[in-house]
Every structure is written in C-alpha cells, then in structure tokens.
Amino acid sequence: SLSNIYLIMGVVWKWPWTNILSIQYYNVAGTILGVATSILLLTKGVRNRYIFTAGFLLLSCSMLWFSYLFYPDVSQRAIAYPLALEGLAQGILFTPLSLYMIGGVHPNFSGNASLVGTATRFWGSLIGYALIQNLILHLGTRQQTYLSADLDLTRPVFQAQWNNLLTQHSSTNLTNDAFSLTADSFQNELANQSLLHTGIDIFTALFWIGMIVTMVCYFYQPLKASFCGMFSKAEMQKA
C-alpha cells in the first residue's frame, strides 16, 4: 500500500526525492516504537489476540487516514502522521506474529517455522505489491475514462481553462505547438487526478479489509479450545 503513496509523492505531488526519503523516517520511527510497545505488552502477559486486534485496528485507521489525504496540495506534515501510525501498527504486529508462529509448533520444528514465516512475509509483500500495481493500472484507467468525459469544449468551465492555457502557451510558442502543449497539460492533469481517485478507492478498501481482519482476530477462538470448552460443559452437566 505504501508503494502507492510514494508513487503519488513523486508523480502527482512532485516532491523532491530528498523529501520522499526523509519522510520515511516517520514510518521507521513508528515501527521502532511499535516493536517496543509489542515487547512491553508481551512481557506484561497481554494475550496475542488483543495485540493482533490493536495492531490491525491501528493499521486500518492509518489506511482510512490516508484515504482522506489524496488531494493535489497536501502538505508533507499531513502525510507524516499516518505514515508514523502505519509504522506503529506494523511494529506491534511483527514481534507477536513471529513468536506466535514459532511458539505454535514443536521445538524441533521451530527453525522450519521461522523460515516459513520469513518466506510468507516475503512472498506476501511481493504478491501484495503486484496486486496493488495492477489495481492502480485497472482503476486508474477506469478513472481516466470517467474523467475524460468532462473534457468537452462545449462545457463553459473546460472552455475557460482551455483558453487560459492556450493563451499562455501561445505567447511563447507557435500555434500548433501551443495546441499540443495545452492538450498535454490537460492529459497530465487527468492522469494525476485519476491516480488520486485510485488512491482513495484502494485505501478505503484496505480500511474495510483491515476492519474485517480486526474483528476476526478479536472473536477468533481455536477449534481445539472451543471443543474442549463444549466437552467440559457437557461433563459438568452430566455430573
């Protein structure tokens, strides 16, 4: 999901690459704080289910926060806060998730479980990145189709903007070049707007997916524990 944010930073908002690099420190700081928080919660004996619930809830909130920031003139400070929150959520999830996977198997297979967890994280990130990029292409193309319907010279608003840009380009270029530059300007603006709309759609969907995962983590009970509870209640009733 963050790949979409960084793409928009460079393409739409046109931030210098130094600013894009420096703002990632907020995400790193949030991750370090999240790891420290998860370790503290584990040492206090908090159950993994509650830690997972808190982590996915914070991750969902960061996705929702991002979805409200996709407009052309967003500030870097506005992006830094949800980046830190997203890092905090990831840090909270990483440590207990690794311990949960390793602690749920026999000690003889803990090394294999660690390798499986690393491979799952790697392939999950790779597949997630591929899915996000395909969604950007699909939704971006659809948004461009919808927005291009407004590029009609019979519309007064578009006609005024077209004439304004054409006048600006005509002052320094030949007529054909001015028309070409004006069309390119609108095409670039159309592509930028489609990326912003695509970001809103993707991060809103990620918010709802995260909320579903949060509810599953909170209400999840292993089948073994459920059956044991049912059998114990049945035995007590018989007694």
Image (cartoon, rainbow, N blue to C red):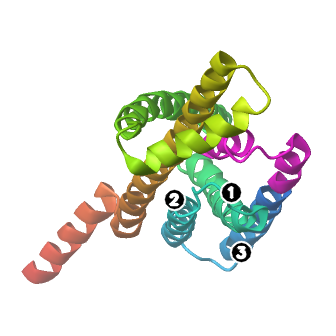
Question: Which dot, 1 or 2, sits closer to the camera?
Answer: 2
Q: Residue at x 13, y 74 (%)?
A: 234
At label 2, which amino acid type do we have? Answer: Ser
Outermost residue toward the top in this view: 176
Q: In whole angstroms, how far apart are the C-alphas of marks 2 and 3?
A: 35 Å
The answer to whether 155 appears left or right of 118 in the picture is left
> Mark 2 or mark 1, which is nearer the start of the sequence?
2
Residue type highlighted by circle 3? Thr
Q: Which residue is mark 3?
A: 43
Q: Secondary structure at mark 1?
A: helix
Q: Is residue 127 visible?
A: yes
- Residue receiving disc 1: 95
The residues bearing labels 1 and 3 have C-alpha atoms spaced at a distance of 12 Å
Mark 2, residue position: 67
Separation of residues labelled 1 and 2 (CA atoms): 27 Å
Q: Is residue 152 left or right of residue 20?
A: left
Q: Image quadrant of residue 79?
A: bottom right
Region rendered in magenta: 1-24
Q: Residues within 10 Å of mark 1 (few under 14, many from 20)?
A: some
